[in-house]
């Protein structure tokens, strides 16, 4: 696999998001053996960046990943996140980036992941109650102590990014970016390039819709959380499926799958962008990673860029309130 740098961190240019292995979308079809096999296959194929978070599960996704990479830790650029679990009593899904909470969180993640250091440690969501300067000062201490190697932000806005970077260089911003979600392009991407910060794109396949495998809402399991996502709602689904059909047209021209085309388009947006498509199956992993070898024509890239906007917000109202937009 080709490599790029996120800030000063070397990594394969396609990573693996482990979130779905925790059943965050659906518990239907969960298979730990297949999940571990997928992680091992990713490493065999040259993936280095693997992404998780303490909130996934909570905790169980880090534990799974820790078991999977045992004996292969030196092959992994290990990324996890803090700040969506308050360890002072309020518990999961409560934003808390206080210095004391960060220190509790990192020790828990290190234990669950079975490692003595985390390569890339993200603030999962900006904490409005803790100045970003205090957050980064704590992270800089953890870097000095060797517990983390680099730090990143997730779904942070331009002011937060600048203030954080002034305290200690930010290695990467992780935010949603895909053919369906383009709001990072006007301000955030130019800012990251100005400051020398890499970009890690989560949900690069539109939560699975850009794979072409979801043809109706009935294709989602009854317990699938995407039923609550506005882009999968009854009023928006058909519009978004028509956009997918345009991606499928390009895929036929390119002799590729829609997922590969969506990832290749994203890779073409810059050599400082690493998509982390999530999957829990080897077959999907292999399909996604083949995008590393797919080169779209300029005309195909331009056509995809002009695809048009997806209908519906990319998060629920409650989730949108947690991100700086």
Image (cartoon, rainbow, N blue to C red):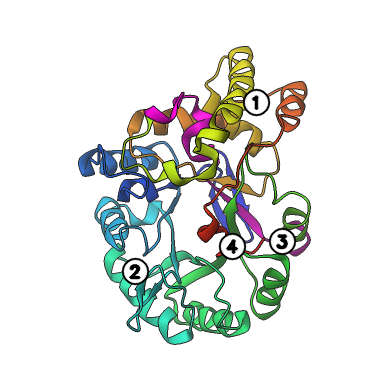
Asked whether the residues under the numbered discs 2 and 3 touch, taking CB atoms below 8 Å apart as contact, a structural biologist would say: no
Q: CA distance from mark 2 to mark 4?
A: 23 Å
For the residues marked 4 and 1, what is the alpha-carbon distance in whole angstroms? 33 Å
Is residue 114 at all visible to an observer of this figure? Answer: no
First in sequence: mark 3 or mark 1?
3
Can you tell which mark lies on residue 323?
4
Q: Residues within 10 Å of mark 1 (few under 14, many from 20)?
A: some
How far, Cα to Cα, is label 2 from label 3? Answer: 27 Å
Residue at x 47% of width, y 85% of height: 99
**Dot placed on the residue nearer the N-terminal end, 2 or 1:** 2
Q: Residues within 10 Å of mark 4 (few under 14, many from 20)?
A: some
At a point 35% along the width and 78% down the height, the residue shown is: 90
Disc sitting over residue 196 in the figure: 3
Please give the range of residues in magenta. Answer: 193-218
Residue, disc 2: 109
Q: Is residue 251 above or below residue 34?
A: above
């Amino acid at each position: 696999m080709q490599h790029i740098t996120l800030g000063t961190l070397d990594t394969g240019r396609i990573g693996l998001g482990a979130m779905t292995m925790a059943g965050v979308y659906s518990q239907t079809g969960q298979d730990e053996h297949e999940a571990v096999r997928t992680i091992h296959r990713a490493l065999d194929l040259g993936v280095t960046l693997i992404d998780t978070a303490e909130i996934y599960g909570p905790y169980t996704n880090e534990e799974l990943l820790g078991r999977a990479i045992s004996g292969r830790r030196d092959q992994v650029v290990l990324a996890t996140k803090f700040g969506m679990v308050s360890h002072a009593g309020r518990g999961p899904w409560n934003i808390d980036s206080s210095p004391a909470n960060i220190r509790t969180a990192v020790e828990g993640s290190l234990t669950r992941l079975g490692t003595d250091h985390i390569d890339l440690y993200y603030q999962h969501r900006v904490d409005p109650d803790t100045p970003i300067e205090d957050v980064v000062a704590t992270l800089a201490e953890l870097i000095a102590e060797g517990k983390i190697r680099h730090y990143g932000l997730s779904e942070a806005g331009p002011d937060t990014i600048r203030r954080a970077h002034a305290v200690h260089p930010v290695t990467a911003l992780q935010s949603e970016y895909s053919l369906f979600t383009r709001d990072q392009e006007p301000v955030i991407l130019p800012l990251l390039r100005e400051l020398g910060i890499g970009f890690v794109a989560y949900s690069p396949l539109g939560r699975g819709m850009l794979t072409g495998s979801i043809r109706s809402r009935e294709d989602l399991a009854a317990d699938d959380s995407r039923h609550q996502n506005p882009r999968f709602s009854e009023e928006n689904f058909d519009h978004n499926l028509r956009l997918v059909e345009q991606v499928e047209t390009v895929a036929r021209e390119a002799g590729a799958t829609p997922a590969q085309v969506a990832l290749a388009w994203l890779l073409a947006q810059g050599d400082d962008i690493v998509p982390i498509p999530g999957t829990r199956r080897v077959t999907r992993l292999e399909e996604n990673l083949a995008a590393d070898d797919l080169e779209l024509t300029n005309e195909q890239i331009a056509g995809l860029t002009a695809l048009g906007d997806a209908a519906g917000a990319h998060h629920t109202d409650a989730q949108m309130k947690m991100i700086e937009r």
